[in-house]
Image (tube, rainbow, N blue to C red):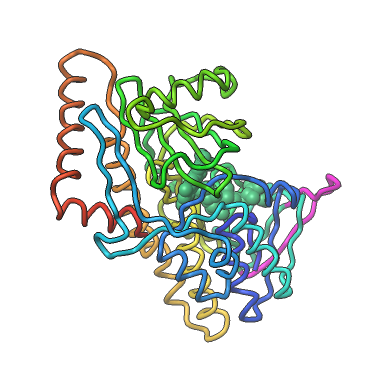
Amino acid sequence: MVVLGAGPAGLVLGNILVDRGIDCVVLERAERTHVQTRARAGFLAANTVRILERHGLADGLHRRGQLHSTCEFRTEDGRFRLDYGGLGQGEPHTVYPQQDLVTDLLTRFLDRGGQIRFGSEAVAVRAADSERPEVAVREADGRPALWRARYVAGCDGRHGAARRSLPAGTVRHHRDHGVTWLGLLAEAPPSLDAVGYAVHERGFAGHMARTSEVTRYYLQCERGTPADAWSEERIWDELELRMRARTYGPLHRGRLVQRSVVDLESDVLEPLRHGALFLVGDAAGLISPSAAKGANLAVLEAEVLGRALIDDLVVGDSKGLDAYSARCLTHIWRAQEFSHWMIGLLHGPSGADGESLFHNSLRRSRLTSLRTSRSQQDWFAEHYVGV
Ligand code: RFL
């Protein structure tokens, strides 16, 4: 088995396979330190935690992760909180930085005897109609190599080789939501004990705890804004303005240690299987970070594929592999639908024309429903924490 990419998808899959004695190599383009320090996600759904527990991969998150179950909306109509951990299915998030999870998964994979080659970049995958699939690789020293395996898992993200190697006729559903966020990581403790969503006429601002010393913030900006366009002071001033710090209290400021520009985009590829090649995680579909679903879907899909591969390779039952694409697409589309709904909840056009006014009034009405309707709150909680 060849797995492309050592992100959450590739490493969960690799762990599930080596744990059952299936020969598996992970090819990773980047160096180990890069993989272990890349800060991205942080909110793990309850089902993600259960999957990781089932495969003996949850020790670190239980030791160092924090349960999180409240979000706060700040809008032109005031603020309200939802204790979503007590609504819907009654499940909290576990906040655990993605780079810590990846480090745990990597350590466990190597302990279990898994093989990983850092600095090995997959260049092309020939698996769609081949009996003996091949992965062409550029090794760390620049030399070409060829890996052959029964199956290939494309867990190499949105810019990986798996996506580039798909046969003509693969369908790509795509949406550019027309919204851009500046993603920020601050060396500062969280400023509120909740996920903060600020809806403001100047644009969205978000606050998400990562650890007791690190907080992620998002600031909606114009499309095309370079990551370094704003000074730190301007960013903090703008965050405080949109989060209405004068009314609700100042933010804990700190050094901004990471900035990235995120154009909110979603896509889903269909099908997720092409002969012996399976797409998993961001390689299968990209989901905007508005509802924090990407890493959770990656873990879920890795488990679905891992179990199906075990059935096929150990017991000779290929039904799970045949059903992989349809099964995952059902989960992916539910997450996409909620994520899309969140984008509509948190952003509105800035103009004063009739269409913008109409859209913003709908958004306010949606927030009012969320504030006042118990059934709407249960629906929100179930989809917010669920994958
Ligand atoms: P990854 O994590 O991108 O890993 C892919 C790996 O493949 C390697 N690679 C290759 N290796 C070999 N050959 C090639 N040709 C290769 N090309 C690439 C890469 O180096 C990398 O190591 O994909 P994976 O495993 O599918 O995991 C997906 C998640 O990382 C992603 O969905 C999340 O980070 C999304 N996301 C969030 N998801 C959540 O569930 N909760 C969150 O709170 C959350 N916050 C976020 C996020 C994504 C963000 N970014 C990227 C915009 C916050 C941010 C800012």
- The foreground one among 116 and 169 is 116
Res. 383 visible in picture:
yes
53 relative position to 383: left or right? right
User: Where 177 falls versus 190 (above or below)?
Assistant: above
- The foreground one among 227 and 211 is 211
Residue 218 x/y as whole percent: 46, 33
User: Where 202 falls versus 90 (above or below)?
Assistant: above
The C terminus appears in which quarter of the rendering? bottom left
Magenta span covers which residues? 137-150
User: Residue reaching furthest top?
Assistant: 352
Residue 320 x/y as whole percent: 43, 74
Q: Quadrant of residue 147?
A: bottom right
Residue 258 x/y as whole percent: 61, 34
- The foreground one among 32 and 238 is 238
Q: Residue at x 17, y 51 (%)?
A: 376
The N terminus appears in which quarter of the rendering? bottom right
262 relative position to 354: left or right? right
Q: Does 362 lie within the magenta span?
A: no
Q: Residue at x 39, y 22 (%)?
A: 241
111 relative position to 257: left or right? right
Residue 214 x/y as whole percent: 57, 43
34 relative position to 234: left or right? right
